[in-house]
Amino acid sequence: MNLELTHFSAAVLFAVFASVVFGITQRNTMPEQVRYGLYCFAMFVGGVFVAGWIMSLLRR
Amino acid sequence: MPDSTNATNRVAAPAAPLTAMTIVVPILAWLIPGAGHFIQKRFIRGLLLMFCIFAMFFLGLAMQGRIYRPNGGDILDMLGFVGDVGAGGLYLLTLALDAGKGAISHATADYGTKYLIVAGLLNFICVADAYHIAIGKKP
């Protein structure tokens, strides 16, 4: 089996899995876990966009 | 005025009691990601953790990621091994099946290698979490 994801989809999938684990393990109650998981996801994906724009600007 | 933060005045936190669960849980959680939570009746947490780590690991293999083997060579290879070995049973199974050879012919194989390492590292966090539940530090 050979799965070829795009850079973006690989990064988003990575963010989903890592955020779920961070949310569950780093907070105690369910609402806190959900909030922290969403926060981590936003940070991961936001980081992807920021890094993408920086690389795009450096390339010009 | 005496300094209450002085080390001599500080009361040591009581050590976690050594029970069968405090030994079994980390070992089981390492061998089977999520099982440490299952055994303590945290079924939803365990299921989510198991799904995330299994999915990451198998996606890594599907992307032709490389599994690091025990070696004393390059420092980066050793760090990769430490990350990979965190996946416990999944790592041992992959070694036994002689999978995870990696491919350098396409760019996403490198993503696969990172997925495999991070799956192991996330499982280390899950092991610590399961242990904290076992000693009563976390609900």
Image (cartoon, rainbow, N blue to C red):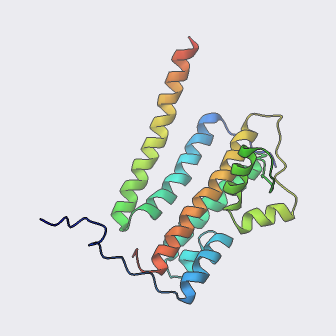
Residue lying furthest bottom? B19
Q: Is residue B52 left or right of residue A38?
A: right
Residue B118 place in picture, x, y as percent: 62, 52
Question: In which quarter of the view is residue B84 placed?
Answer: bottom right
Asked if residue B32 shows in the view, the reply is no
Q: Is residue B64 above or below residue B89?
A: above
Q: Is residue B116 left or right of residue B38?
A: right
Residue B113 place in picture, x, y as percent: 72, 46
Residue lying furthest right? B98
Residue at x 51%, y 34% (from the top left corner)? A48
Residue lying furthest left? B1
Q: Is residue A45 above or below residue B41?
A: above
Count of numbered marks: 0
Residue at x 72%, y 38% (from the top left corner)? B108
Q: Is residue B65 above or below residue B10?
A: above
Q: Is residue B19 left or right of residue B99?
A: left
Quadrant in which the N terminus of chain B is drawn:
bottom left
Q: Is residue B125 above or below residue B26?
A: above
Quadrant in which the C terminus of chain B is drawn:
bottom left
Residue B32 place in picture, x, y as percent: 66, 72
Residue at x 69%, y 50% (from the top left corner)? B79
Residue lying furthest top? A60
Asked if residue B122 shows in the view, the reply is yes
Residue at x 51%, y 82% (from the top left corner)? B40
